[in-house]
Image (cartoon, coloured by chain):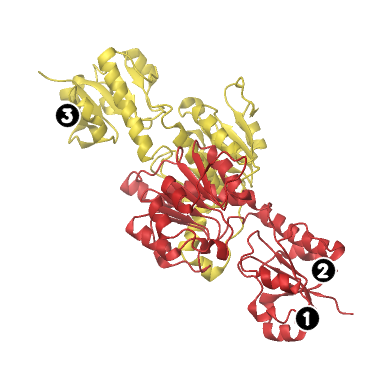
Chain colours: A yellow, B red
Amino acid sequence: MTRPILLVVTPFSQEALVPLQEHFDIVQWQSLPSPEAFCAQHGSEVLVLITNGMAGVPALCRDALANLALIACNGVGHDAIDLDWADARGIRVTNTPDVLSADVADFAMALALAAFRRVPAADRYVRENKWSRLGAFALTRRFWGSKVGIVGLGRIGHLIARRAGAFETQIGYTGRRQQDGVAYAYFPTVLALARWADLLIVATPGGADTHHLVSRAELEALGPEGVLVNVARGSVVNQSALIDCLESGRLGAAALDVFEEEPQVPEAIAHCASTVLSPHIASATVQTRQAMAALVVDNILQHINVKSLISPVN
Amino acid sequence: MTRPILLVVTPFSQEALVPLQEHFDIVQWQSLPSPEAFCAQHGSEVLVLITNGMAGVPALCRDALANLALIACNGVGHDAIDLDWADARGIRVTNTPDVLSADVADFAMALALAAFRRVPAADRYVRENKWSRLGAFALTRRFWGSKVGIVGLGRIGHLIARRAGAFETQIGYTGRRQQDGVAYAYFPTVLALARWADLLIVATPGGADTHHLVSRAELEALGPEGVLVNVARGSVVNQSALIDCLESGRLGAAALDVFEEEPQVPEAIAHCASTVLSPHIASATVQTRQAMAALVVDNILQHINVKSLISPVN
């Protein structure tokens, strides 16, 4: 008797998969000698697929997965998963909200403080023995008291606002609509928010709705002393406009956890003195990745046992 | 008619000194061809001296400054200024409290987040193109929800506690005594605080009273997953014990803005993967250094005009 297949598209904890071994044959997409041959032979046996919001469902196997019932996205963003396609095929989609929000908010603050106070550059300065050879490090920007503009006041945005508010800042936000019961200043557009803010933190979902939401006009409005932080998706910021604004000094600094073509980072960004960079790690703590993996697995177990989801997307 | 001399021992804003030019001949210690000759010829004409808490009054000129009336310390810490000597000579001492507290608290948080989330190492990883060559960066420590122990709950410590509290942390502190009206958990010793804490932030004054307050026992109590942040003075932490504990893994990580022999940083610290380093810049923002310089000058003007001080130390 053949068991259904669980296809794991993106790196995932082996330990977390243990409770699923009694229900599925588990296949690692990245270990397949021939993905095409696998799809032709076994595509119809795949019942559940684990992926993330950047990889989605590989185009190569999409048509072959005739009996796919569940896409489990390891992350809150599901922008690469085509929900219209999933709905049309009756495929359920689940993600991992909430468990990663506080880590992402922490990391947004880590990047903001690192950009204002030039933490990585200061670290290099000491390690390269420049302090004793060249004397004092250049003065940096004050963080406390700044105007913090949050693009997308969702779960993560609210946690960023709470954290930033403890640094004697003013908080503003923009989003599709003004939120009831929220005391932060509302701005109807990213442009209006950027004109007001010293620091713009991007915390929206990715996907078509937010593509290049932050572009040249918004970056220029943020200005030569302004700082951009992106912990959302590379697609939300127009990367070539960002490069232009950093190179010309029309934007002060940018701290980026995400990029348009990850893991590729353009040299103009990687070699820029006014950037702080990280390899998409806003939720990448030991504890949170365990909690995310556990939620992925719990969603799959609940789906096969009682046909419902803990955190449904569609 | 000769005017009194203002002797400037440490780097100081030329612009901020302008209001003092009508009252003093201003002499830069570091530009003197022969400090000895200057002391012999003009030591008795020095009425006011500007220094900082690390440099104090140069030993070379101490006896020559027979008419020194005011030592203006550009910073809140005045550990290198001998207050007993000043008191015995009737010399007033002033410093710059308050104006730098929020910047130092910001920077303590910047260092704590940078150490937990490995911000400088992540930045290097992207810049050195390791993300695209080697794949994902190693998972890091979660910051939110941690137990934050503050050594020295003064002006700066309180601002650190307010900031850290917004990250869903628990806050504890130690100091000479438990403070009335403070809800944070009090620990009678640094050792007891270190046993409880995930993160120990040192925010005490320097000087003999706090020398090596954090030593081997405290670092081992903080433990292999524990993080030390020092924004106070290098003298408060036993640096050789710190090196031992980092090298042996008995301490998880350390983020250090201050060192025992600045600007010298031992290679064992500079080359350590579990440190985040900065060149004593916790208060080094453009805005705060301007505010500090203005307060130094205002203290001097108030002293010469009405014989009182805005922020007296003794």
Q: Callout 3: residue from which chain?
A: A
Q: How far across and how far down the image is residue B99, in percent?
A: 69, 52
Q: Amino acid at mark 3?
A: Ala
Tag 1: amino acid = Ser
Q: Which label number is shown at residue A118?
A: none
Where is the N terminus of chain B found, in terms of image quarters?
bottom right
Mark 1 or 3: in front is 1
Q: Is residue B13 left or right of residue A113?
A: right
Q: Which mark, by number, is residue B44? A: 1
Crowding near pointer 3: few (<14 within 10 Å), some, many (20+)? few
The Cα–Cα distance between marks 3 and 2, rounded to whole angstroms, is 84 Å
Q: Which residue is pictured at 64% across the width and 43% down the height?
A: A223
- Residue A181 shown left or right of residue B15 in the figure: left
Tell me the CA gap for discs 2 and 1: 19 Å
Image location (x, y in percent) of residue B52: 65, 66
A39, above or below B152, in the image: above
Q: Amino acid at mark 2?
A: Gln
Circle number at residue A37: 3
Distance from Cα at disc 1 to Cα at disc 3: 92 Å
Pointers 3 and 2 in contact (C-beta within 8 Å): no
Asked whether the viewer can see residue B187, the reply is yes
Residue for badge 2: B21
Report helix, strand or loop for mark 3: helix
**Percent position (x, y) of residue B295?**
74, 57
Task: Using the image, determine if residue A37 lies above or below residue A219.
Answer: above
Residue B272 in the image: above or below residue B153 = below
